[in-house]
Image (spheres, grey):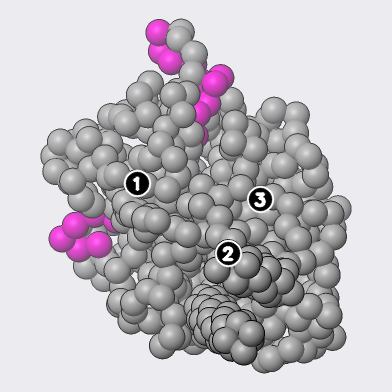
Amino acid sequence: MKSLMKKCSIVFLAIILLVPSAFFSDQEVSAEDSNPEPIEFERATVHDPSIIKADDGTYYIFGSHVAAAKSTDLINWNSIVDGEYQTPENNPIYGDLSENLAESFEWAGEDDADSSGGFAVWAPDIFWNKDYVWDDGSIGAYMMYYSVSSTYIRSAIGIAVSKDIEGPFEYRDTIMYSGFHNEEAYDSNSDVNKHWENTNIPDLIEDGVFDAVNPDWFTDTGAYNNALYTNAIDANILYDENGDLFMTYGSWSGGTFILELDKETGTPIYPGEDGTTEDGRMIDKYFGTKIAGGYGRSGEGTYAVYDEETEYFYLYITYGGLFSEGGYQMRQFRSENIKGPYVDASGNEAVFPESFNIGVGNFPDLDDHKDIGNKMMGNFLFKNESDEAGTGIGTGYMAPGHNSYLQDEELGKEFIITHTRFPEQGEMHEVRVHQTFKNSDEWPVPAPYHYAGETIETVSEADVDGNYKYINHGKEIDGMLIESSSINLNKDKTVSGAVTGTWEIYDDYRVELTVEDETYDGVFIKQYDPTAERWVMTFSAMSDDGVVIWGSHDTSTEESDTAISQYIWLLFGILLIVIVGFSLFIVRRKKNRN
């Protein structure tokens, strides 16, 4: 009997040694891939989020309608107000909203025109000014550059300050006005006289900043010339490479402008005279230097950031309408000079050409600027296939836009922060944070899924080949939802499926894909898929024309691979039993014969 068992053991071991090692490697599962528990995310609703990291490491976002939230990890957010416009009489951000912002509201934004019955306090930018001087001589302040608005051109930008990041913020000044006329004029449902004498311009003339109004501010009928001059909202504050302070601002209409600021007060240093830049862009005595947009085309939510490593100023602007089917989407430019000119990956200038001039007004239906600017992100859906884990239609956004940007030196990571709506969920919106990675041309490109704590690391070909859900964001400005298609990154370095071409890894985690005669450069990174509730390999890359593509490893193929592997093991087990049984039968038969 011992001889029989010995022979059977030898047969069993021989079979094990003959089994391809690939069968065993398929069974290896890392702790991350096993996803023992899904990640729960705490969400926040803050429109037009402006981000800042406080000294204690807490992240804050402030947005339109006096909304605000905070986070310790950029993943989970908690509102610091009960709701938009919480208790206007005793607001946690501004105190008594009506009283404290009264000077700004004299021009626009409170129970007036299209804000009848309420408030229109929009798109603040939060900024820590280390040089601000208080009345008592103390130094340093959190500065809130907020907007008030009535109609699409009558607006103003004001400043409020606080020593505490959570406020309350005290009013200081209203620094920029738009929508003024050269004569007495009124909007519907408004008692505000829109004559320029009711702005801060008379004070600037009296103080000798400039000697008279610019006649080009007005049309032949005396109305505001918004084809050339902007809607004064959406401020953004930043330092240049020399530590000087600047403000970009402006929405639709005449485009985006930039002004230098006095660091001790945070107020503008108005140019004082009209002119043009060396490359032919407008310099206005009041509004500053034009750096983007114009002629009533879509473009708002400007946010600029200086990168010490690349020595570029990156400029982000949102095109399209802000509603779920309005085509809202983030665009990107850069410049070596804070005052421009800013260009996209194709070399298109951010300031729109004079050929776009068709007169005053805003023109949301025109898309003649769709090829200008790198399109960072628009409407998309990574579809949840029927054989995948998770529920619902998948992960996707509608109308992501009006972003801010964070360079977190402590983490060694960069992020784009936006509000977004969602497919089949109407106008409900929430904040999303996406990590960004620079491609080989030094363009930051956002990763496909919102941040869940991931860190980029070396990947192998075995890590990344397989089937992917594929998104090409294109360049369109419309409300269409781009749904994922299916592609395969094959082991032979070819791409097949919805698009065809080649792919390769270089420099540990970088990817170059050439599909449909376009080359895209970016990175591979493992991210958390919130629909499948598991970590998957993704890629994000940008073409030389500023088109962004994304890929997310298809979890249905993972399930299929697992099922096939399990099926193979089942067959192997059956085969093993048959072989061992047959061996026992042969041995016993020989023994009986003997």
- For label 3, the residue is 456
The residue lying at 15 percent from left, 60 percent from top is: 117
Residue type marked 1: Trp
Q: Which residues are magenta?
A: 115-136
Q: Amino acid at mark 3?
A: Ile
Of residues 585 and 352, which is closer to you in this image? 585
Rendered view: 553 above or below 476:
above
In the rendered image, residue 271, in percent from the top left (x then y), is placed at 67, 40
First reached walking from the N terminus: tag 3 or tag 1: 1
Q: Which residue is mark 2?
A: 2
Q: 524 above or below 555? A: above
Q: Is residue 117 magenta?
A: yes
Residue 270, quarter of picture: top right
- Looking at this view, is 395 or 112 the one in front? 395
Q: Secondary structure at mark 1?
A: loop
For the point 18% across and 46% down, the residue is: 82
Secondary structure of the residue carrying numbered label 3: loop
Type of amino acid at the residue the image marks with label 2: Lys
| Mark 1 crowd level (few <14, some 14–19, many ≥20, 10 Å Cα) | many
Q: Nearer the viewer, mark 1 or mark 2?
A: 2
Q: CA distance from mark 3 to mark 1?
A: 23 Å
